[in-house]
Image: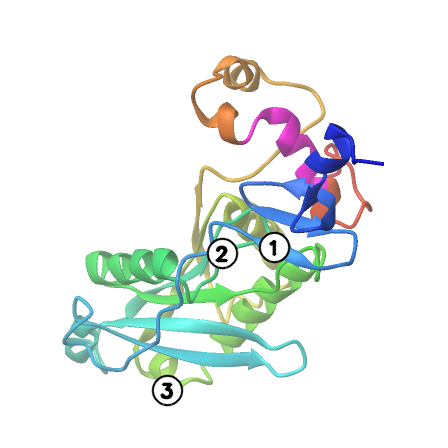
Amino acid sequence: MPANKTSLANQKDGRNISVDMYPFIRKYEDGSIERFLRSPFVVASPDQGGNRGVATKDVVVDKATGVSVRLFLPSRAADTAGRNRLPLVIYVHGGSFCTESAFGRTYHRYATSLAASAGALVVSVEYRLAPEFPIPAAYDDAWAALQWAASLSDPWLASYADTARTFLAGDSAGGNIVYQTAVRASHEVNDDMMNIAGLIMVHPYFWGAKRLPSELAWADDSEGVAAVFPPYGVDRLWPFVTAGQAGNDDP
């Protein structure tokens, strides 16, 4: 008997779709994952000449989880050794907790621009993604990166970072993650090791079951963002990335 329209709509390439979070991610009943909006990988390079005067390198900060970071060191660091150190920015990328990468072109370019323009040493966190690693894995990874940076175990950090001027920054899902990191740091960070001078959240992801006025207006914008990712789609995101362990009003 031919498949009906509903069953065809829930299939792709002969696979049954379990969770459809397009344009971010799609999960199939066989457990496979298809990610969208993931920008091409960019190789780190210590050469400052071709990257706006910013050298980059990757470091694994937790061998047990594989969590790593990409460091961005601006050329002005050469003028500060032993004198005025650079502000330290711990950056966490967005992507609905389930896509994108610190090593992708989008966030590599963004962190490069930030380091060059602000004259800051940027530590961009490559955290584990949901649904393979549900929340709170991303929170734990950001925390591990912060602790690693505070230890100054990397030569770039030891030589150039001013941990008294540490800023936590992130966009979208990353904004949510750095907020959680800041709350944890307020209870656990030793001020002698690191002083968090500021928190920068760029359109951070926070959501609730009750619609806010701006969300109602967004829902009516059928030709804007809502046409691609409507509020009811966002409603499904948090339960998805927490493996069904939390609802949208979970703190």
Indicate the position of residue 244 as horizontal and vertical percent values.
81, 45
Magenta segment: does it hold 244? Answer: no
Dot 2 crowding, Cα within 10 Å, few <14, some 14–19, many 20+: many
* Residues at marks 3 and 2, CA–CA distance in whole angstroms: 28 Å
Badge 2 amino acid: Glu
Q: Nearer the viewer, residue 6 or 180?
A: 6
Q: Which residue is mark 1?
A: 34
Residue 147, picture quadrant: bottom right
Badge 3 amino acid: Pro
Indicate the position of residue 1 as horizontal and vertical percent values.
85, 36
> Is 205 drawn above or below residue 129 in the view shown?
above
Q: Residue at x 47, y 50 (%)?
A: 37
Q: Please tell me which of labels 1 and 3 falls first in the chain.
A: 1
Q: Which residue is mark 2?
A: 100
Q: Residue at x 68, y 31 (%)?
A: 235
Q: Which residue is mark 3?
A: 155
Q: Residue at x 63, y 41 (%)?
A: 21
Is residue 58 shown left or right of residue 140?
left
Q: Which residues are magenta?
A: 229-238
Q: Please tell me which of labels 1 and 2 falls first in the chain.
A: 1
Asked whether the viewer can see residue 157, the reply is: yes
Is residue 121 shown left or right of residue 206?
left
Indicate the position of residue 172 as horizontal and vertical percent values.
50, 43
Magenta segment: does it hold 233? Answer: yes
Asked whether the viewer can see residue 187, the reply is: no
Q: Residue furthest right?
A: 1
> Is 220 drawn above or below residue 111 in the view shown?
above
Badge 1 amino acid: Glu
Q: Which mark is residue 225?
A: none
